[in-house]
Amino acid sequence: MRPLLTVADLGGEALAEILALSEAPGLGTPLAGKGVALVFQKPSARTRNSMEMAVVQLGGHPVYIQKEEVGLGTRETAEDVARTLACYHQLIAARVMDHRDLLAMAAATDTPVLNMLSDLSHPLQALADLLTVRQLTGRIAGAKLAYVGDGDNNVCRSLAEAASLLGAELVIASPEGYELSDRVDGVRQVRDPAEAVEGAEIVYTDVWVSMGQDAEAETRLRALAPYQVNEALMARCSDAHFLHCLPARRGEEVTADVIDGPNSAVWRQAENRMHTARGAMLWLTAAAA
Ligand code: CP
Ligand code: NVA
């Protein structure tokens, strides 16, 4: 049984299937009487709540596990945590500091492991992002996306992989040292935010200091300051929708007038986290059956 650790692992066909499942009504309760472990090494509002409610919608029981409770890699190895949780649960979902812990967990058990965010990737976010793009523009293939800011973070990497697999056109604008470090087919990287948003239907950004990067905060804020998504930038693509995975820092990567303005679709995007979490778990449990 395959884990779901990155978008690239999934491939285009599975990605499209999950998006279809995310919007399909009445697909039953395949998790009835089953548990889903939700392990968090970092804080979360959207991921925890969307996953818990998606598990409930599928008839299952979510067990929320905080960092201190299992002590992934401290109290017990990541492998032993996974082997333990596999005794009770149909799926093991985890948000980790280090992506290698997810790989260790997935290697230790046949129970599917689902990445709820690591330093490298955030596949559940990318699923919701693409569903939102399709709802807003009517398509994914050929949709024109711009990502402005920290190009080498988990959210941008997963968005890039997803856009590439489903044929959306993504241009990433980031300063030197913050470019997406992977080469992703069909994704263009530029320096100038104005160039990235030219003709864009969707403008996306994320925080400049991700969880776990607090020690670099000052350097990051300085380097990324010219990459703020504000009204002047949005005026270059006046009909474009604004997206952000959230949480947002108003006045840093985005101004309040943009994120709270009429072209912002961040709350629809946040709601879609629940629909795509349900789609992803339906796909994982069907594949495991
Ligand atoms: N977008 C997202 O993953 O939000 P949380 O960190 O609140 O889960
Ligand atoms: N890049 C952010 C995303 C939060 C959902 C972080 O890792 O903190």
Image (spheres, rainbow, N blue to C red):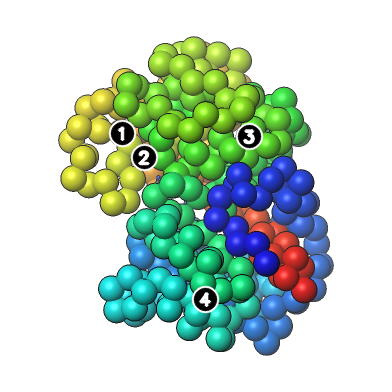
From the image, state whether disc 3 or disc 1 is nearer to you.
3
Question: Are circles 2 and 1 on residues that touch, CB within 8 Å?
Answer: yes
The front one of 4 and 47 is 4
Tell me residue 221's x, y (percent): 24, 32
Q: Amino acid at mark 1?
A: Glu
Sooner in the amino-acid sequence: mark 2 or mark 1: 2
Q: Determine which residue is flagged by label 4.
A: 37
Q: CA distance from mark 4 to mark 1?
A: 34 Å
Q: Amino acid at mark 3?
A: Ala
User: Around disc 4, counting alpha carbons within 10 Å, would you say few (fewer than 14), some (14 to 19), or many (20 or more)?
Assistant: many
Mark 2 CB lies closer than 8 A to ligand 2 = yes
Q: CA distance from mark 4 to mark 3?
A: 29 Å
Secondary structure, mark 4, is: strand
Secondary structure, mark 1, is: loop
Q: CA distance from mark 4 to mark 2?
A: 27 Å
Q: Determine which residue is flagged by label 3.
A: 163
Residue 207, which numbered label? 2
Q: CA distance from mark 2 to mark 1?
A: 8 Å
User: Around disc 2, counting alpha carbons within 10 Å, would you say few (fewer than 14), some (14 to 19), or many (20 or more)?
Assistant: many
From the image, state whether disc 4 or disc 1 is nearer to you.
4
Residue drawn at x 41%, y 35% is: 152
Sooner in the amino-acid sequence: mark 3 or mark 1: 3
